[in-house]
């Protein structure tokens, strides 16, 4: 069984920083893409940042220059450093990963989410 567990959310003021963590555990052979998504109240879930196992990263236009995704492949962990937070960044942030549990089996997994609230 594979689990993704996020941590690091909270209530902060605009202009502040937060660092989210997501640790994958369980029967993991390897991890391909890891990503952060977010879902604001009344809105659809959207991708925030992605990180491939080869080291490539990509960001939503709304967070470019403010957020940084990083990962430790040996620890099966991904982080999201969020700087210069804005009220519009308020959302539940979800970790997502494509995890290979055997040579022939890859599945997509979601964490349960961590709430980030940015006050103005």
Image (spheres, grey):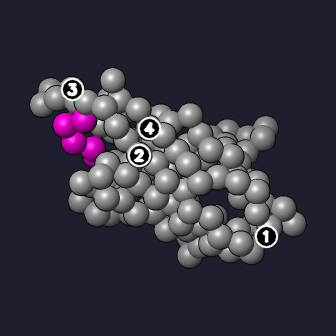
Tell me the element at label 4.
strand
Closer to the chain start, of discs 4 and 1, is 4
Quadrant (top left, top right, bottom left, bottom right) of the C terminus = bottom right
Residue under the image location 65 percent in, 70 percent down: 17
Tell me the element at label 2.
strand
Is 82 part of what is drawn in magenta? no
Contact flag, marks 2 and 4 (Cβ < 8 Å): yes
Find residue 14 and name its label.
1
Q: How far apart are the two marked residues, 4 and 1, measured between alpha carbons? A: 28 Å
Closer to the chain start, of discs 2 and 1, is 1
Residue that numbered label 2 is attached to: 23
Closer to the chain start, of discs 2 and 4, is 4
Residue sitting at the far right: 120
Q: Residues within 10 Å of mark 3 (few under 14, many from 20)?
A: few
Closer to the chain start, of discs 4 and 3, is 4
Tell me the element at label 3.
strand
């Amino acid at each position: 069984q594979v689990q993704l567990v996020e941590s690091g959310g909270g209530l902060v003021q605009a202009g502040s920083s937060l660092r989210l963590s997501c640790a994958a555990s369980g029967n993991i052979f390897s991890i391909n893409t890891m990503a952060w998504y977010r879902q604001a109240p009344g809105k659809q879930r959207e991708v925030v940042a992605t990180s491939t196992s080869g080291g490539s990263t990509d960001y939503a236009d709304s967070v470019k220059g403010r957020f940084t995704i990083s990962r430790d492949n040996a620890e099966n962990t991904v982080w999201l450093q969020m700087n210069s937070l804005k009220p519009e960044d308020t959302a539940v942030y979800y970790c997502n990963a494509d995890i290979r549990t055997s040579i022939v089996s890859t599945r997509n997994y979601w964490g349960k989410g961590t709430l980030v609230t940015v006050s103005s």
